[in-house]
Image: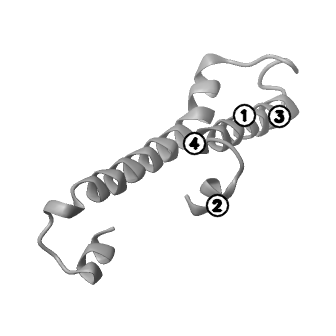
Amino acid sequence: MKWFDRLPGPFWVGYLAAAVVLNLALAAAHWSVGWYPVGTFTRLHLLLGFQIPATLAFVHYLNRSAVKALDDFRPALIATEAESLSLR
């Protein structure tokens, strides 16, 4: 996730690019063995290629949301600065 945060632009663009690359690699593997004609994609393989990056992007979003919520409620949190940082 840190690697995707360091990329320019929104983090989800990196995950979208990873999904496209994964789909192309999956399709190229199927084209090379003749499972379906070159240049065609099946819905099932597109779904499978997007599933892993989409799940990782969702986890990334949830982590960012949790950190933002913790920062927003920091004044109400009864904890030392070190404890707050360890929760973060």
Q: What residue is at 42 percent from the left and 48 percent from the top? A: 59
**Residue 63 position within the rendered picture, expressed as x and y whole percent measured from the top left:** 39, 53
N-terminal of the pair, mark 2 or mark 4, is: 2
- Assign a secondary structure to mark 1: helix
Task: Calculate the distance from the C-alpha at mark 2 to the C-alpha at mark 1.
Answer: 18 Å
N-terminal of the pair, mark 4 or mark 3, is: 3
Q: Are marks 2 and 4 in contact (CB under 8 Å)?
A: no
Q: Amino acid at mark 1?
A: Val
**Residue 38 position within the rendered picture, expressed as x and y whole percent measured from the top left:** 88, 21
N-terminal of the pair, mark 4 or mark 1, is: 1
- Label 1 neighbour load within 10 Å: few <14, some 14-19, many 20+: some
**Residue 20 has which mark?**
1
**Residue 28 has which mark?**
3
Q: Amino acid at mark 4?
A: Pro
Task: Calculate the distance from the C-alpha at mark 3 to the C-alpha at mark 2.
Answer: 26 Å
For mark 4, what is the residue?
Answer: 53
**From the viewer's perspective, is the residue at label 1 or at label 3 nearer?**
1
Q: What residue is at 59 percent from the left and 33 percent from the top? A: 50
